[in-house]
Image (tube, rainbow, N blue to C red):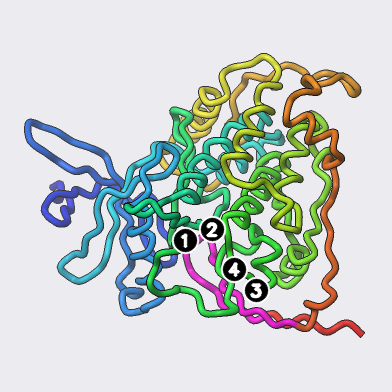
């Protein structure tokens, strides 16, 4: 005997559990209409045990509020925000048939390959366009009201089987017009490996902090491992504070110097030395993409890569493991040998490379900051939050 499908709010039919996190569950669902109309949606529902925790519910409400105010092709759209009869909140969102960027990078890594750099650049351009829409948000009266994502990471970048990239999870976002703050003074929120140095120092998150995180995401997608990693959270935290950026070229010699320069430009320790906006960084990456060797259209290839991984796994959701044949079989043509230019010197990306930013590993001293104590709330992939207080020892 087949049980009746679960229906919430009288119109959303739950199809299957798509993801289980520490604070919320994500369901694939369908909304039904007249004359057989049906639309697939995602329903993110806060778990019952977290309903009474004010900090969690506030972040969940903030995610719905911010998402509803941002309409952009590269941002997951929020359709509805409701509460069930038991008082549990849930967000009705756009369903993306695909997987997150982190899972795609993992598929390449476990197959012993690197993600082709044109695909990484294509994903970065789309994500930055979504970030730009958030950073450039305005109130109805036209005044600036930027939204800082504060949690840009591979797992919050969704890639569809059609190659369309969408930024999601604005739960930690900071909107300038909000009447209260979800973060106490001196507290940092965001996944540790993608924090910017100024935020790690206890400073305020800004759009330029999101750009630093985007640089870390691009570096990770190219290399297949995290930019900032260590044996402990404290070790990683110190790397970020010092902005110890490992050189990219030795790990990816096929990557053009123009792309290395753009990524290093985002990963500078001083915020005012980064790109002025997400749109500017997206433009620079678009210039780099023009230097790609002959091959399939990057967006089309990006969708084929996602579809290939999912099809070979025989699953509809993100796979927990990957086999060696899960990546596309097509290859990009061999890049020019060392010494051969990837593009004209008049290219903005080329000019940036020639200014000395290539492999310029930003570093900074902790003098004047070593004795500072910063309260950190690490947002984990399972949506739980781990509070930690880090107090580095003062230098003698």
Residue 136, how many percent across, how many down? 48, 48
Which of the 4 image quadrants contains residue 197?
bottom right
Q: Are marks 2 and 1 in contact (CB under 8 Å)?
A: yes
Sequence order check: which comes first, mark 2 or mark 3? 2
What is the quadrant of the C terminus in the image? bottom right
Residue 204 is tagged as: 4
Residue 88, how many percent across, how many down? 25, 68
| Cα distance between the residues tagged 2 and 1 | 8 Å
Q: Answer left or right for 374 relative to 363.
A: left
Give whichever of 289, 38 is nearer the camera.
289
| SS for callout 4 | loop
Comparing labels 2 and 4, the label whose residue is closer to the camera: 4
Task: Please state the extent of the stretch shown in magenta in the rendering.
Answer: 372-389
Comparing labels 1 and 4, the label whose residue is closer to the camera: 4
Residue sitting at the far left: 35
Mark 4 surroundings: few (<14), some (14-19) or many (≥20) residues within 10 A? some
Give whichever of 47, 159 is nearer the camera.
159
| SS for callout 2 | loop
Sequence order check: which comes first, mark 2 or mark 4? 2
């Amino acid at each position: 005997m087949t049980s009746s499908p679960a229906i919430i709010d009288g119109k959303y039919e739950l199809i299957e559990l798509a993801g289980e996190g520490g604070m919320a569950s994500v369901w694939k669902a369908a909304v039904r209409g007249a004359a057989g109309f049906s639309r697939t949606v995602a329903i993110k529902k806060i778990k019952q045990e977290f309903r009474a925790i004010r900090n969690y519910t506030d972040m969940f409400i903030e995610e719905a509020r911010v998402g509803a105010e941002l309409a952009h092709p590269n941002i997951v759209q929020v359709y509805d925000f409701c509460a069930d009869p038991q008082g549990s909140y849930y967000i009705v969102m756009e369903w993306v048939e695909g997987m997150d960027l982190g899972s795609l990078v993992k598929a390449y890594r476990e197959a012993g390959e690197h993600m082709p750099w044109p695909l990484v650049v294509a994903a970065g351009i789309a994500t930055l366009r979504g970030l730009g829409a958030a950073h450039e948000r305005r109130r109805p009266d036209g005044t600036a009201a930027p939204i800082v994502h504060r949690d840009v990471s591979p797992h919050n970048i969704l890639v569809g089987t059609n190659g369309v990239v969408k930024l999601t999870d604005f739960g930690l976002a900071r909107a300038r017009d909000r009447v209260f703050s979800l973060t106490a003074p001196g507290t940092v929120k965001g996944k540790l490996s993608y924090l910017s140095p100024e935020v790690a120092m206890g400073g305020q998150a800004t759009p330029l902090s999101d750009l630093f995180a985007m640089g870390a995401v691009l570096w990770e997608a190219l290399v297949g491992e995290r930019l900032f990693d260590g044996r402990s959270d404290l070790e990683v935290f110190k790397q970020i504070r010092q902005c110890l950026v490992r050189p990219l070229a030795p790990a990816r010699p096929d990557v053009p110097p123009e792309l290395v320069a753009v990524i290093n430009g985002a990963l500078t320790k001083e915020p005012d030395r980064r790109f002025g906006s997400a749109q500017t960084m997206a433009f620079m990456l678009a210039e780099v993409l023009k230097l790609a060797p002959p091959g399939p259209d990057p967006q089309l290839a990006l969708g084929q890569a996602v579809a290939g991984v999912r099809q070979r796994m025989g699953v509809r959701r993100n796979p927990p493991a990957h086999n060696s044949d899960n990546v596309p079989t097509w290859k990009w043509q061999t890049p020019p040998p060392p010494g051969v230019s990837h593009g004209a010197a008049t290219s903005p990306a080329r000019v940036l490379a020639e200014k000395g930013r290539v492999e310029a590993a930003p570093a900074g001293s902790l003098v004047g900051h070593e004795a500072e104590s910063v309260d950190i709330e690490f947002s984990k992939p399972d949506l739980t939050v781990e509070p930690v207080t880090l107090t580095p020892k003062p230098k003698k």
